[in-house]
Every structure is written in C-alpha cells, then in structure tokens.
Image (cartoon, grey):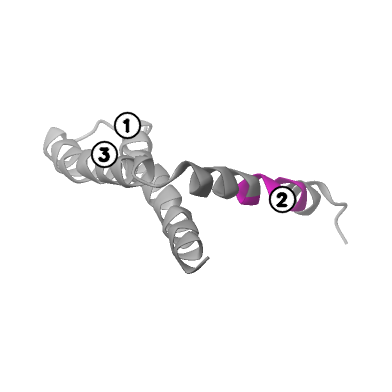
Amino acid sequence: MFSLIIMLSTLSCLLPYLFSSLSEIALYLRKKKPYNKQRLLSASLISIPAFLYSLWAITGLEYEVLFWGAILLTSGVPIYAYMKFRPPK
C-alpha cells in the first residue's frame, strides 16, 4: 500500500511537470511579437528533455497506478465544473 501511495504521488507531480514543459514552448510561439531564435532554442533545449523525462517516468509506473491516477484525476472534474460554472455571489 505504501508503494502504491508513493507512486500515485509521483504521478500527481509528474503530470503538471509534463504539461508545463510543453506549455513553455507553446506560449512562446503564440506571442504576437517576433520571437528571438536564440531564446526559442534555449527554451526548447530545456522543455523537450523535461517532457521526455516526465513521459518516460510516467510510462515506468505500474498499470494499477495509472488506473487509480486516472480515476482520482477524473473525480476532480465535477468539482472543477461546479467551481467554474456556479453563479456569482
């Protein structure tokens, strides 16, 4: 049980790391200003290995951990929907 909890916490830390590593490049490319190729290259040299590492670490987890992680993440969707669409006070 302890190892399951540790792997679930690892998964919960790796998912934001996975998405934030790609969002750096996506946000940089969406800017309306002309971009600096040197800054894009340095952002890519950090973001792409970070994305690959977190993807590699997630695929190394057991299927049971991925299953329970998916259940726990989707259980938060109704709470998010309630908070997002509730009438203002």
Q: SS class of the residue under badge 2?
A: helix
Q: Are marks 3 and 1 in contact (CB under 8 Å)?
A: no
For badge 2, the amino acid type reads Tyr
Q: Is residue 73 left or right of residue 51?
A: right
Q: Is residue 61 left or right of residue 45?
A: right
Q: For marks 3 and 1, give the CA distance.
A: 20 Å
Report the front residue among 36 and 22. Answer: 22
Q: SS class of the residue under badge 1?
A: helix
The residue pinned by badge 3 equals: 52
- Please tell me which residue is depicted at 32% across the width and 31% down the height of the picture: 29
Query: Of discs 1 and 2, which sits in the foreground?
Result: 2
Q: For marks 2 and 3, give the CA distance.
A: 28 Å
The residue pinned by badge 1 equals: 29
Mark closer to the chain start, 3 or 1? 1
Q: SS class of the residue under badge 3?
A: helix
Q: Find the magenta span and give its range.
A: 72-79
Q: Residue 20 placed where, x, y %?
A: 39, 47
Residue 48 among those drawn in magenta: no
Q: Residue 54 placed where, x, y %?
A: 32, 46
For badge 3, the amino acid type reads Leu
Mark number displayed over residue 80 = 2
For badge 1, the amino acid type reads Leu
